[in-house]
């Protein structure tokens, strides 16, 4: 799945709030209208490595210049909606540290099978988790290249 960044501010997310917010109030995306998503670039295309279902919104797991993040889907437009054939789905258990903040995860096998994968990747910035992410990204890019060449 590929997406293109069309917004990178909290102001752009205001249209997707469930109810009107005051000027500097934080909404369901955890951002105010002054928030900036500096980890993404308007106009740039991203390979989606996972979809994180948070308590109040969904986010794409992407990276820009080596920085891995989960950004609200509403900041992007879908360029290619085909999902990787090797993706899995996992519901987050109530006893996990990331529950109820994270409800479910779609993505590459290691992201779904290791209960600490999201926390290690996004919160702890664990080097091994990042290596796994980029290894899976390379594999996914190769699969896309074969598909695009008709192999």
Image (cartoon, rainbow, N blue to C red):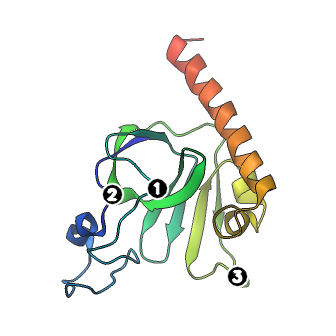
The CA span between labels 3 and 2 is 28 Å
Percent across and percent down for residue 110 are 75, 52
The CA span between labels 1 and 3 is 25 Å
Percent across and percent down for residue 138 are 67, 33
Res. 71 image quadrant: bottom left
Residue drawn at x 33%, y 83% as measured from the top left: 26
Q: Earlier in the sequence, mark 1 or mark 3?
A: 1
The CA span between labels 1 and 2 is 8 Å
Is 70 situated left or right of 97 in this image?
A: left
Q: Earlier in the sequence, mark 3 or mark 2?
A: 2
Residue under label 2: 8
Q: Earlier in the sequence, mark 1 or mark 2?
A: 2
Q: Residues within 10 Å of mark 2 (few under 14, many from 20)?
A: many
Is 15 situated left or right of 84 in this image?
A: left
Q: Nearer the viewer, residue 105 or 64?
A: 64
Helix, strand or loop at mark 2? loop
Residue under label 3: 97
The quadrant of the image that shows the C terminus is top right
Residue drawn at x 46%, y 56% as measured from the top left: 39
Helix, strand or loop at mark 3? loop
Residue drawn at x 73%, y 84% as measured from the top left: 95
- Label placed on residue 39: 1
Residue drawn at x 26%, y 85% as measured from the top left: 24
Q: Are marks 3 and 2 in contact (CB under 8 Å)?
A: no
- Label placed on residue 93: none
């Amino acid at each position: 799945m590929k997406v293109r960044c069309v917004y990178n501010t909290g102001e752009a997310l205001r249209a997707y709030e469930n109810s009107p917010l005051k000027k500097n109030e934080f909404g369901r995306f955890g951002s105010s209208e002054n928030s900036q998503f500096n980890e993404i670039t308007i106009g740039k295309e991203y390979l989606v490595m996972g979809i994180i279902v948070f308590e109040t919104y969904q986010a794409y797991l992407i990276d820009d210049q080596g920085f891995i993040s989960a950004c609200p889907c509403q900041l992007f437009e879908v360029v290619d909606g085909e999902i990787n054939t090797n993706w899995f789905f996992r519901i987050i258990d109530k006893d996990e540290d990331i529950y109820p903040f994270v409800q479910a995860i779609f993505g590459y096998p290691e992201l779904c099978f290791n209960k600490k994968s999201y926390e290690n990747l996004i919160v702890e910035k664990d080097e091994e988790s990042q290596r796994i992410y980029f290894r899976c990204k390379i594999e996914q890019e190769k699969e896309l290249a074969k598909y695009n060449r008709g192999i």
